[in-house]
Image (tube, rainbow, N blue to C red):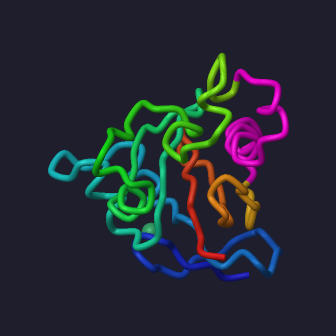
Amino acid sequence: MKRTCLICHAVFESADDDPTIAQGICLQCSEGIVTPASAVTLGEFLDQISVPVLLMDDDVRVAGFNQAAHTLLGGQHHELSGRLAGEVIACENAGLPGGCGQTGNCRGCAIRHAITSTYQTGERRRNVAAKQLGKLISTEKVGGFVLLRIDER
Ligand SMILES: [Zn+2]
């Protein structure tokens, strides 16, 4: 089926036959995220996406974010970069001993699972219920990162 790019809105072919998958990141934009043009910061590049997105590394820490995510997560009061997923979404487990990813509850975390499984397999996840946010999330591997998109329910 055809998909449209979240950043440049180009229509591109996808081998994926899941009809619910309508948007992704085209190869060209994916390369732009991995190696941003010198004049454009990663944040500015991601700001081309109107929905909230976070770029997560293999440690499930924030490597980049856009303005929409910053606003949604109340980022004006704290720094997002380098922080664990559970910290930026104010997951209650992030406040327990050990913190995000290290508590007994983290094994069942849909957000962590979506990010790590996409990172390891390269397969995207769609419409994963992130109960800490009360929203659906989608993940897509982009270079050495996972782009996490927060969708409205
Ligand atoms: Zn694109």
Does the rendering let one see residue 131?
Answer: yes
- Magenta range is 102-123
Query: Is residue 114 within the magenta segment?
Result: yes
For this orientation, the residue located farthest to the left is 39
Q: Position of residue 122 (x, y in %)?
A: 71, 45
Does the rendering let one see residue 144?
Answer: no
Q: Nearer the viewer, residue 153 or 3?
A: 153
Quadrant containing the N terminus in the rendered view: bottom right
**Up-down: is 142 above or below 138?**
above
Instruction: Indicate left or right for 99 with 103 as reference.
Output: left
Q: Dividing the image into four equal quarters, which quarter contains ligand 1?
A: bottom left
Q: Nearer the viewer, residue 117 or 104?
A: 104
Query: Is residue 150 within the magenta segment?
Result: no
**Up-down: is 59 above or below 76?**
above
Quadrant containing the C terminus in the rendered view: bottom right
Instruction: Indicate left or right for 117 with 46 as reference.
Output: right
For this orientation, the residue located farthest to the top is 98
Instruction: Indicate left or right for 131 with 44 as reference.
Output: right
Q: Position of residue 85 (x, y in %)?
A: 56, 39
Secondary structure mainly formed by the magenta segment: helix
